[in-house]
Image (cartoon, rainbow, N blue to C red):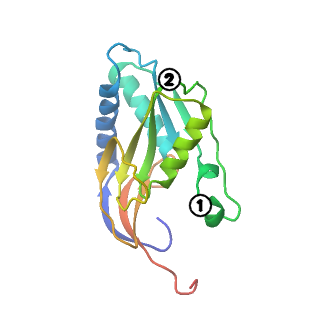
Amino acid sequence: MEPNDVIKARLMDAHDLERMLQRMARQIVELMDPDDPGGEQFALIGMQTRGVYVAQRLQNMIRKIDRISLPLGILDATMYRDDFRKRLKQPVVKETRIPFDVTERNLVLVDDVLYTGRTVRAAMDALLDMGRPACIRLLTVVDRGLRELPIRADIVGRTVPTIAGEEIRVRLRETDSMEGVWLVERRIDERQS
């Protein structure tokens, strides 16, 4: 967790998260066209940072469930955000690597938390600059509500309504020293005010 986080609830442990991702992998397979048994017209796009690891896990699960090997792309939409100049003085841009043509492909955009919708809008803009997908679906581990844009997820692991001051922390073993999902309250350090 972050130093100023106060844990309000642990929403999922590692086992819960794994079970939820298994369910979501099956939902992705159900979206595939029966006339495309190998999933050639489907691809996963993981959004930096934790969305990439969630997408990798889903790709592995789908390979084990149905022996379908979906292509995987990595996307950083930082430069497409409408607020990146306001939020960061020097934005940290991470890798974007999509080793396939997105045109006419059914894409599943994968992120860890859906909140305002601004990151998803930026990701869609980035993808549309690369081509014209047949469709873009959104998968998110947690939808915390309070949208600023009319964006919704097609596949949601869990919906957790939040209030001002609350945040959702998804932690994964690939990037963090812990695994699970927490509801936290972000406290402002009085010395920083």
Can see residue 58?
Answer: yes
Which residue is depicted at the point 31% across and 61% down? 10
Answer with left or right where residue 84 lies relative to residue 141: right
Q: Secondary structure at mark 1?
A: loop
Q: Amino acid at mark 1?
A: Asp
Instruction: Name which quarter of the figure residue 5 lies in.
Output: bottom left
Q: Secondary structure at mark 2?
A: loop
Q: Which residue is mark 2?
A: 104
Which residue is depicted at the point 40% across and 73% down? 165
Which residue is depicted at the point 35% across and 31% down? 28
Extreme residue toward the right, this view? 90
How far across and how far down the image is residue 91, in percent? Answer: 67, 58
Tag 1 or tag 2, which sits nearer the N-term? 1
Is 34 rendered above or below residue 59?
A: above
Answer with left or right where residue 5 lies relative to residue 28: right
How far across and how far down the image is residue 42, in percent? Answer: 44, 24
How far across and how far down the image is residue 19, in percent? Answer: 29, 41
